[in-house]
Amino acid sequence: MFDFDQPLLIAGLLLGVSSSLHCFGMCSGIAASLNLAATSNPNQPARNIYLTTLLINSGRIAGYMTAGAVVGGVGSSIFGSFDRSLMHAVLRWAAAVSLGWIGLSMIGLLPFPTIFYRVASIVSDLMNAIANAMRLPSVIGLLMSEAV
């Protein structure tokens, strides 16, 4: 079924397994805090807590899958038209500068790039308008909020 002789397939598998450490370190804290916020009412039935947890995590996973598919699809078509060694260098530097800027802005040395807030606000307003137009129940908002 699978040809494991191809190094690209094995490299992708190893990259996926190794990136699970990132997910455990970064995403589990976010998911746990969302779960704690959603279950802050001690009188809430256990069924609602399980449903909230399921929606939060389903939205998180669906959001990552959607973002990965979009970025992978767009990136693969764009990436093929450039010199690969140059693009690798440009992407490495862009990632380093972005992470450095965000890190320095978190400690107050640089201003946070407000474009992220504006884009997120536009997407959130659009999703809210769609949900209101479709008359979706409010619990769907937990699922939709993680897709952004």
Image (cartoon, rainbow, N blue to C red):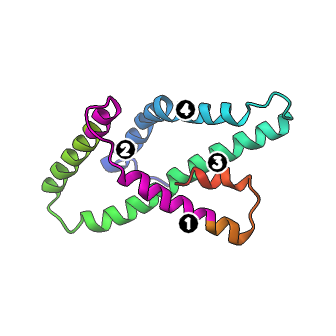
Read off the residue under disc 4.
Answer: 28
Circle 1 sits on which residue? 126
Identify the element where label 4 is drawn.
helix
Q: CA distance from mark 3 to mark 2?
A: 27 Å
Q: In which quarter of the view is residue 104 placed?
A: top left
Disc nearer the start of the sequence (4/3): 4
Identify whether 17 is placed above or below 116: above
Can the viewer see residue 6?
no
Callouts 1 and 4 close, C-beta under 8 Å: no
Query: In front: mark 1 or mark 2?
Result: 1
Mark 1 and mark 4 lie on one chain; the one further toward the N terminus is 4
User: Which residue is disc 2 drawn over?
Assistant: 10
> Horizontal and vertical percent for residue 69?
45, 60
Q: Nearer the viewer, residue 41 or 97?
A: 41
Give the SS element for disc 1.
helix
Contact, mark 4 vs mark 2 (Cβ under 8 Å): no
| Amino acid found under the numbered disc labelled 3 | Ser
The image shows residue 27, relative to residue 9, as above or below, that is: above
Q: CA distance from mark 1 to mark 4?
A: 27 Å
Mark 4–mark 3 CB contact (< 8 Å): no
Judge whether 83 appears above or below 3 on screen: below
Magenta span of residues:
101-128
The three-letter code of the residue at mark 2 reads: Ile
Give the secondary structure at mark 3: helix
Q: Is-magenta flag for residue 132? A: no
